[in-house]
Image (tube, rainbow, N blue to C red):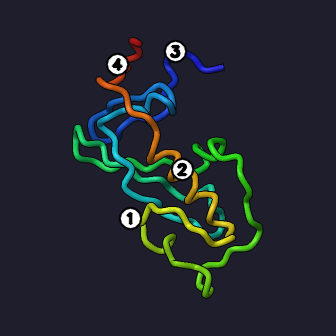
Amino acid sequence: MKSPMDVFKKCTCCAFSWRSREEFLQDTSLELIGYQVNFEDLKLGYFLFNHLTCQSTIAIAAENFRDLYSGPVFADRLTGSESCPGYCLHDDVLQPCAAQCECAYVREILQIVRNWPKTEGRPAKIAQGLG
């Protein structure tokens, strides 16, 4: 069980904290800018966000978003094949991939995160253990 002191993510530049993944994804001061793939273990890749408040980049392991997707996960990786458009080879390409590739499910999660509804105003900062 989470304690009131727990946070989902804290910005290493300005120390702003988000209590939950939902709070993080709803924040209008964050912009999804990329995906850094780890071909050996896809859940160890990173989703990259710009924190517009302090102009820093925040990386969060893809495994933190895995439960957002419930569709098919293909067994084979097609990177480098004729059916692969090569999206995962470019950190800043966010579009979905139509290939029946092991990596395709991460591309779908990117769409979910990218299209997450934003809320007006920012969540309250967790300052020095006060929440």
Q: Amino acid at mark 3?
A: Pro
Residue occupying the far bottom of the picture: 82
Which amino acid type is marked by label 2?
Ala
In three-dimensional space, the C-alpha distance between marks 3 and 1, rounded to whole angstroms, equals: 35 Å
As shown in the figure, which amino acid type bears the numbered disc 1? Asp
Q: Which residue is mark 2?
A: 61
Question: Is residue 34 or residue 116 the one in the foreground?
Answer: 116
* Residue drawn at x 53%, y 46% as measured from the top left: 112
Q: Nearer the viewer, mark 3 or mark 4?
A: 4
Where residue 90 appears, as percent x and y from the top left, is: 43, 72
| Above or below 113: residue 9 | above
The residue that label 4 is drawn on is 124
Of residues 14 and 95, which is closer to you in this image? 95
Q: Residue furthest left?
A: 54
Q: Earlier in the sequence, mark 2 or mark 3?
A: 3
Query: Mark 3 falls on what kind of element?
Result: loop
Q: Determine the residue positioned at 58% across, 55% down.
A: 108
